[in-house]
Image (cartoon, grey):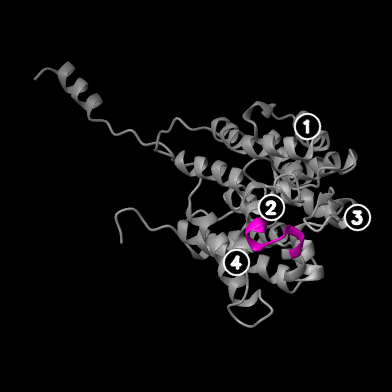
Amino acid sequence: MSEQSIHQEDRQTKLLVSSSPHILSNDSTRKIMWTVIIALVPAIVFAIYYFGLPAFQTLAIGGISAVVFEVIVQKIRRKPITVSDGSALLCGLLLAMCLPPQVPVYLPIVGSFLAIVVAKHAMGGLGQNIFNPAHIGRAALMVSWPVAMTSWTKMQSVVDTVTTATPLNILKMQGYEALIDTFGSQTEMYKALFFGLRNGSIGETSAFLLLIGGVFLIYKRYIDWVAPVCMIATVGILTWLFGGSNGIGSGDPLFHMMAGGLIIGAFFMITDYVTTPITRKGKIIFAVGAGTITVIIRLIGGYPEGVCYSILLMNCVTPLIDRFIQPGQYGRK
């Protein structure tokens, strides 16, 4: 064997070592973010149709202001401008969908500033934030402008009265019977909750369209079905056990599973890659914890809804969950 052929053989058998990740994929941050935005489109279109121009205005201002703040802060930090990846727009849209349709113009702007500048870039930028930025923005607006954040559109009830309360507000303040009277019957109430013919934030009306978007993301394998199912199931089970006035097991789980921001929170918030646990077991713990806190706030706390605060509280313990729930080593049981 010649010296040249030996050198050729050495080159062919050389082992190349590189840093992780070693799995190639066609997915990217840009593709995932824009796919999530597409999944929200049915619910967004319905909200604009149902609530009218105020909803469109709030959504547009929330999305645009988030993009503008992203550009400004990246220029200040001398970072590459990455608004084309859709992450800032998605954050602004999710924030706007957590707001009442007729909020003052400055609220989505302030919320976007807090979400993008404070909750996201103050922590280091995309992928380094501890808390869900959209929910940080909403929580800050809620404590700063509680009246504006709880002023809802008018809804005609079946008893010829006009109500500006959400279903959860009616349940909290007036009780379950008054809730049924507002819609006429339990069946009509379920229809209104499922299809979106009720008061509420822009993104919490139509459970049906949000479910379509969530199932689409599961089909695309961008989110794991375990987290949303566990959170919704936890809320359903606990409200059935403890949510009624006639003892254990007299609650209405269907109402609580479709009311408020549970569906959008379960499919579009607790499935965030950055602020939730890495492992499937960790995701289950996170989802059950968020569902439990949601029920505690709804049934015992002063607010009628607790999805936002439950997710933020569980964001706090995500590093702890990841520390103790480690993925298994490759090749070992």
> Which amino acid, mark 4?
Pro
Which quarter of the picture shows residue 1? top left
| Camera sees residue 304 | no
Task: Label 1: state its secondary structure.
Answer: helix
The answer to whether the residues at label 1 and label 4 have Cβ atoms under 8 Å apart is no
**What residue span does the magenta drawing correspond to?**
181-189
Which circle marks residue 60 in the picture?
Answer: 1
In front: label 4 or label 3: 4
Q: In the rendering, at what x and y percent does residue 294 appear?
A: 67, 65
Spatial CA span between label 3 and label 2? 25 Å
In front: label 1 or label 4: 4
Which circle marks residue 147 in the picture?
Answer: 3
Q: In the rendering, at what x and y percent does residue 153 appear?
A: 84, 47
The answer to whether the residues at label 2 and label 4 have Cβ atoms under 8 Å apart is no
Spatial CA span between label 4 and label 3? 29 Å
Q: Which residue is mark 2?
A: 131
Q: Which residue is mark 4?
A: 253
Q: Earlier in the sequence, mark 2 or mark 4?
A: 2
Which quarter of the picture shows residue 80? top right
> Which amino acid, mark 3?
Val
The answer to whether the residues at label 3 and label 2 have Cβ atoms under 8 Å apart is no
Left or right: 167 as drawn, with respect to 43: right
The residue shown at (56%, 47%) is 211
Q: Earlier in the sequence, mark 3 or mark 1?
A: 1
Q: Earlier in the sequence, mark 4 or mark 3?
A: 3
Spatial CA span between label 1 and label 4? 34 Å
> Which amino acid, mark 1?
Ala
The answer to whether the residues at label 3 and label 1 have Cβ atoms under 8 Å apart is no
Q: Earlier in the sequence, mark 1 or mark 4?
A: 1
